[in-house]
Image (tube, rainbow, N blue to C red):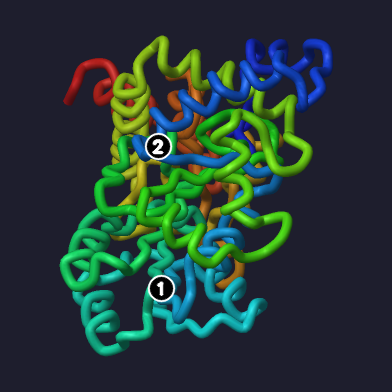
Amino acid sequence: MLLTPGPTPVPEFVRKAMADITIHHRTPEFEAIFKETRELLLELFDMPEAVMLASSGTGAMEACVTNLTHKKALTVNSGKFGERFGKICAAFDIDYTEIKNEWNTPVDVNAVIETIKNDSDIDAVFIQICESAGGLRHPVEEIAKAVKEINKDIMIVADGITAIGVEKVDTTNLDAVITGSQKALMLPPGLSMIGLSNAAVEKINAQPKGYYLNLSAEIKKQGQNTTAYTAATTLIIGLGAILSKIKEGGFENLYAKTALRAKSTREALIAIGCEVYPQTPANAMTTIFTENAPAIRKILKTKYNVNIAGGQDHIKTSIFRINHMGLVEDFEAAWAVNAVELAMDELGLRAFDGTANKVFAQSMFKGN
């Protein structure tokens, strides 16, 4: 049972869609598929423009940094992926300043406001919606609104790789929202997507940057239902299939079910003495802080057939993370919390009495 926060399991109907005959990317047949997929993607982002790139999410992060920073970037670092925005800036000699917090701590809105007010060179802000290194949710919408009130021309770029498809993100004040194929969209790795505002498109076209990750070129071509370079045809076909399926069931229904599963999982684990790591948990995953994380993960994988994730860097052995993204079955989440309680019993941390499963079922199905 794969319950890591990416890659997530690929549903059978998506695998079947991608297993069909190979279609050349410069044909009317593929252009029709591309058009339908693009329209669904625009609906998912709720933004006026979107592009798909044959890259991991890091490629989309790089494209946004290089194409939307003309002077200086402000990066928010509360984890491995916030840190990555700064590393991309450094790699391209782009001037940047960083607000850094511990990985369980969301950025303070006032800290962003003060940094913006004190540095008129900043023309782009880069932040994670969900910082998946610790399962943290940043107050992105509040920050974007506050920054736009100071200077509407500052670009707000949000990494939504573990947020898009998980929750409804208010994109009113966002200029670029990034996501990737292998998270809530339940595809193999290799495709990234960026939703763009009209202001972002104007800025990109005013000063195009890069070659392969030149967003101006992709915006032009993808508006014509093709790509500047070879398209990731199989992944785009899979994306069309998964977005059609999600729309059929209702985007809002998926968000509500994911939020309830996340809430129920957290309540179940808290009930057996676990400590939730982030101060503001995201619904993409449940992150538990414990020195016994490696032992619990090992027991879950070897004895109870549940594969969950640990941490990275300084919290590598201090947390475990259970995924809620995608079409996770209720019984899978229930078994995961039950397995954690069984592992804790085996480690002598708590006698097993079925509390986790009971609390999960009560929250998930009885509404309290």
| Residue underneath mark 1 | 102
Q: Quadrant of residue 125?
A: bottom left
| Residue underneath mark 2 | 45
Residue 132 located left or right of residue 213: left
User: Mark 1: few, some, or many residues within 10 Å (few <14, many ≥20)?
Assistant: few
- Picture coordinates of residue 180, whole percent (x, y): 57, 42
Residue visible at 36% across and 58% down in the picture: 278
Give above or below for 83 relative to 47. Answer: below
Indicate the amino acid at tag 1. Answer: Glu
Q: Earlier in the sequence, mark 2 or mark 1?
A: 2
Asked if residue 350 can be seen in this view, the reply is no
Quadrant where the N terminus lies? top right
Q: CA distance from mark 2 to mark 1?
A: 29 Å
- Picture coordinates of residue 147, whole percent (x, y): 23, 68
Q: For the residue labelled by badge 2, is the local secondary structure a helix, a strand or a loop? A: helix
Residue visible at 60% across and 75% down in the picture: 87
Give above or below for 244 relative to 159. Answer: above
Give above or below for 71 relative to 49. Answer: below
